[in-house]
Amino acid sequence: MKILIGQPKQETQLEQLRREIAAHPDIDLLLYPEGYCRHTDLETLCQLAKQYATIIVTGYRNANRLDQALIINASGDIVLDRAKTPEAGPLYTPSTAVIDGQSTGYLLCREIFLGLDGLKNDTVDLIFNPIGVGMFSEEQYADWSGEAQKISRQQSALFLGTSHADGSYRNCGFSIPTAFAFDATGEAIFLSKDDPRTRILDTVTKTVEIVDVSTVEQTM
């Protein structure tokens, strides 16, 4: 499976997603951050997933501007759509879905810190962690990536996360754009810190291609 992991800026017209899904027709799945799109974009996202036969995993803001988890399969059908879990937990369900024959888990942003409990009774091959904005400190980055590594080991699952390239937690003014991939043994395939370039992961070879978004913009 080829998975595109993007760190777009916060935008209102799906600009980067449209460019990247069109520029990379060989990808099987596209992972974008929490809150990247709005409830009014769902029909468009389903059309894009079907048009390009690509699974889309991201998060969106509902009509009340609250965050929702979202997975759309390659046929353009929504297979997971639920509210974000409050900080107190426990993890909302469903937090798993079968896509392309694989059992997947979904932890929306800070739900990663509920993941060891929330997913412990489920067998999954692949876990997604769409994040809203980047980390607000080096310490948070270490805690977050460390938790992802623990969950990947516990679940023996590939674990992927990504944030937006801009914005900051509660507008604190500091943000470290973040993306990462851990294999099923908890070994890091890549750890991206303050480098918002898109990456395409081949899950078979565990190789990573870095995509220059500006080049994609020029060629579209």
Image (spheres, grey):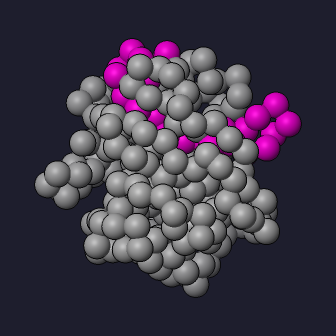
Q: Is residue 55 magenta?
A: yes
Above or below 62: residue 43: above
Quadrant of the rendering where the C terminus is positioned: top left
Above or below 143: residue 176: above
Q: Position of residue 108 (x, y in %)?
A: 61, 54
Residue at point 60% right, 78% down?
140
- The magenta-colored residue range is 47-69
Of residues 47 and 212, the one nearer the viewer is: 47
Q: Position of residue 52 (x, y in %)?
A: 35, 20
Number of dots carrying numbers? 0
Q: Is residue 154 left or right of residue 176?
A: left
| Res. 163 visible in picture | no
| Res. 146 visible in picture | yes
Above or below 11: residue 52: above
Q: Position of residue 136 (x, y in %)?
A: 65, 72
Q: Is residue 111 left or right of residue 214?
A: right
